[in-house]
Amino acid sequence: MTKTISDIAQMAGVAKSTVSRYLNGGSVSAKTKQKLERITREAGYVPNTFAQSLKAKRTNLIGTIVPRLDSFAAAQTMTGIDEEVRAAGGQMLIYNAGQEREREIEAMQELARQKVAGIILMPARVTPDHLRAAEAAGIPVLLVGQGSDQLHSVVYDDYRAGLLMGRYVLQQGHRRIAYLGVTEDDEAVGLRRKEGFRDAVAECGEDCEVFEYESSFKIADARLAAERILDECSPTLIVCATDNIALGVVKTAHLRGLSIPEQLSITGFGGYEVTEIIHPALTTVRFPYFEAGKLAARLVHKLAAGEEIEQRTILDVEFLAQESVDNLNKPSV
Amino acid sequence: MTKTISDIAQMAGVAKSTVSRYLNGGSVSAKTKQKLERITREAGYVPNTFAQSLKAKRTNLIGTIVPRLDSFAAAQTMTGIDEEVRAAGGQMLIYNAGQEREREIEAMQELARQKVAGIILMPARVTPDHLRAAEAAGIPVLLVGQGSDQLHSVVYDDYRAGLLMGRYVLQQGHRRIAYLGVTEDDEAVGLRRKEGFRDAVAECGEDCEVFEYESSFKIADARLAAERILDECSPTLIVCATDNIALGVVKTAHLRGLSIPEQLSITGFGGYEVTEIIHPALTTVRFPYFEAGKLAARLVHKLAAGEEIEQRTILDVEFLAQESVDNLNKPSV
DNA sequence: TCCTGATTTGGAACCGGTTCCTTTTTTAAA
DNA sequence: TTTAAAAAAGGAACCGGTTCCAAATCAGGA
């Protein structure tokens, strides 16, 4: 059976406090050190994590709460967190909230119970309940993707993403545009991106019709929304609030026999891997999900160590011009 | 401060053993029960997991080892596991092996150390090292996706997937086919699928040229392989061992200006969500990743409870005819 | 009212480590 | 050789629960 520290102590003929000291780098004579080295190795001794944590009252676990496991953004972020946490000798505990706000709260309580060193939360929206739960948890909570005045956060520059996208498509000559967004409850994705886009339209000065629509994050819903848009206002371009929504719109366009980008231009936001793979490649804005994960892990470690960090860290985004937007200024052949 | 069981006992004027009994449904008088109900609630008492686990020598955690976090198959499987584990009142601990075999071994040791109730492992390949580590872990280990004579497993019917695909494309009239596979070290994906496909060719009886190529799982590599295939043997169809590989081939075809499926037919395996979204939709075989996850969770729970289960559970696959394969039998217009 | 058996309760040991404090041993200086 | 200081080792308490066993309380029957 698995050995305990007392077993080792007995085998070595020393007190268990000595073994503990040996294991944790305390003052032990060279002779004893050597003997214990051999014995622990031969016995295959591994300390019991619970006993350690019980005494230490904390772990080196970082809890990550994600809205779902099968999303590109979540997967990239988790990978980034994992890489950094592992490098720091810790481990990442993933909690899947399944897109339900209640379960995000529940997850914070549960993670606090498990005495994780810190929590990284990727919420769709920050509610007072979140703040209360974060407060009650008594451990650092870091938001990713959404900001808050109360909690520390790592956010993307959603406003700039919208602005860059707006400037680009206007510069390509589009003046009849549908904006397919998501609920404004989602401040980052629903609101900021749209604001940036609107401001780009405003600063352009010229006449430009923008029709605003709304969809959920699901591809199927995006397809339906696209049907409505095409029926109602036949724009030259549909700007979609996420790459997934854009994929749905692309599908609908294909089904209607519209060629992209000649008959309909489409853009997304996100920079999912698939956007370069599909044909035509999707013009989008790349969000540094992976980097955000790494950064979040570093920051939450700092918080756990009691260090001060900036309230809000804003990560820059990168505009990616690809093939799905037609240049309406080009001389006709 | 967080309360301990002794605090509660003191507040209630009883021994801590009584509180423990109350919490775990032991024999407690109605009066005491009532009092403790109130006090634990008011004090917001939550038991310390470590102390519990230290005594119990086990947890209700299920450890899941995945090759990577950002893969469709892994995400679906994890979601399935999570759903089932949560329903059973447990929790899933995810360990990302980052596609490195060593880290799979390391993960098993680490999870054993953390006394998880069982391990679900999704390996690319089962090596003697895996078997040794599973043995040493002393807790149930269940494989998903790859079988083994030594360990319990949930596998897909890869052979049948290959067979169905082969029969279908032959029936569509293809006789000059490239099979773009992966290393045979991967028994399920690299070997079984190909064997099924070969047998379909054999049973067809007619003359049929099959050119076999190999790629990694990466889209970029698949694109390069596609270039070689198109240069070397100009088949009417490329059968790809995974949907991701197929996506790479589709991309290359598009870049070369080949229209799909008229000039080149392409198929995949997997049933990733994106295969229905791209245009033309990819003909593929759907693998029940989500269901496999749910089943795996149930089975590993049974193993943890000491129940007997079948050595190998084979899950059926579903052929999905979509648009990316041309019917060469159709009368030319 | 007293006795017996069933229920409740309290006390102590234990799970496997860490840490503080004291005692013993070693080392070096006087 | 003696002595003081430093290094090493031992012992016990503690972290926060669970569980076993003995003691106390309660109920019902004689």
Image (tube, coloured by chain):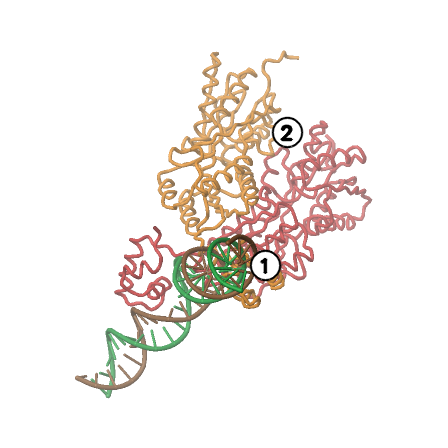
Chain colours: A orange, B red, C brown, D green
Q: Chain of mark 1?
A: A
Q: Is residue A259 visible?
A: no
- The quadrant in which the N terminus of chain A is found is bottom right
Q: Secondary structure at mark 2?
A: loop
Q: What residue is disc 2 on?
A: A279
Query: Is residue B242 shown above or below B23?
Result: above
- The quadrant in which the C terminus of chain A is found is top right
Question: Residue at horizontal 72%, vertical 50%?
Answer: B185
Determine the image quadrant of residue B276: top right
Question: Residue at horizontal 59%, vertical 35%?
Answer: B277
Q: Tell me where residue B193 appears, x and y as whole percent.
A: 71, 49
- A131 to the left or right of B55: left
Q: Tell me where residue B150 appears, x and y as whole percent.
A: 66, 62
Q: Amino acid at mark 2?
A: His
The image's mark for residue B114 is: none
Number of other residues with Cα within 10 Å of mark 1, as a class: few under 14, some 14 to 19, many 20 or more: some
User: In the depicted view, which residue is nearer to us: A262 or B96?
Assistant: B96
Q: Tell me where residue A64 appears, x and y as whole percent.
A: 48, 44
Q: Amino acid at mark 1?
A: Lys
Query: Is residue A113 shown above or below A190?
Result: below
User: In the depicted view, which residue is nearer to us: B98 or B6?
Assistant: B6
Query: Is residue B145 shown above or below B327?
Result: below
Q: Secondary structure at mark 1?
A: helix
Q: Tell me where residue B236 appears, x and y as whole percent.
A: 76, 36
Cα separation between marks 2 and 1: 64 Å
Q: Chain of mark 2?
A: A
Number of other residues with Cα within 10 Å of mark 2, as a class: few under 14, some 14 to 19, many 20 or more: many
Q: What residue is disc 1 on?
A: A33
The earlier-in-sequence mark between 2 and 1 is 1
Q: Is residue B144 visible?
A: yes
Count of marks placed on residues? 2
User: Which numbered disc, 2 or 1, marks the residue closer to the eye?
Assistant: 1
